[in-house]
Amino acid sequence: MFVILTVALWLRPLSHAYWAAGVTTALSLLLGCFGQDVVSLLPTRLAATAVGATLFVAAAWWLLSVQRPKRGQVGGGRAEPGQVSVGRVLA
């Protein structure tokens, strides 16, 4: 169980999904020590994690959509390579 957590912690900088899968696997193994069926529990937990991640991304995409300026508005053009907006410099 500690090997799984160590590998998940090592892979965490690459993607948070590795950490979530590692913790889920460790919790399934821990519950196996208390008499629950690990073989049937692990796929269910990993599927629930995947569904939760998908719903999270869909909700974030819907709520935090990026608004683009309409044609003719100031700032609607693309910046040339090397140009930085004043807002980004001051932020």
Image (cartoon, grey):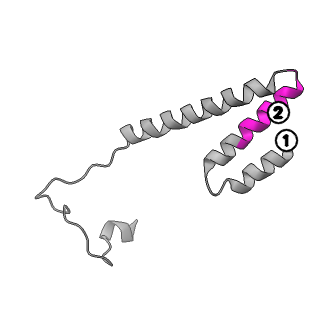
Locate residue 85 relative to residue 15 in the image: left or right. left
Task: Give residue 15's position: percent from left, percent from top.
Answer: 61, 52
Q: Quadrant of residue 31?
A: top right
Q: Which mark is residue 29?
A: 2
Magenta stretch holds residue 31 = yes
Q: Are marks 2 and 1 in contact (CB under 8 Å)?
A: yes
Whether residue 72 is situated above or below residue 39 in the rendered picture: below
Q: Specify the principal SS of the magenta part.
A: helix
Q: Nearer the viewer, residue 73 or 7?
A: 7
Q: Nearer the viewer, residue 28 or 71?
A: 28
Q: Which residues are magenta?
A: 22-35
Locate residue 77 relative to residue 13 in the image: left or right. left
The three-letter code of the residue at mark 2 reads: Leu
| Image quadrant where one finds the N terminus | top right
Q: Earlier in the sequence, mark 2 or mark 1?
A: 1
Residue occupying image coordinates x 32% and y 49%: 66
Q: Which residue is mark 1?
A: 1
The three-letter code of the residue at mark 1 reads: Met
Q: Nearer the viewer, residue 21 or 90?
A: 21
Q: CA distance from mark 2 to mark 1?
A: 7 Å
- Where disc 2 sits, the SS reads helix
Residue occupying image coordinates x 65% and y 57%: 13
Residue sitting at the far left? 72
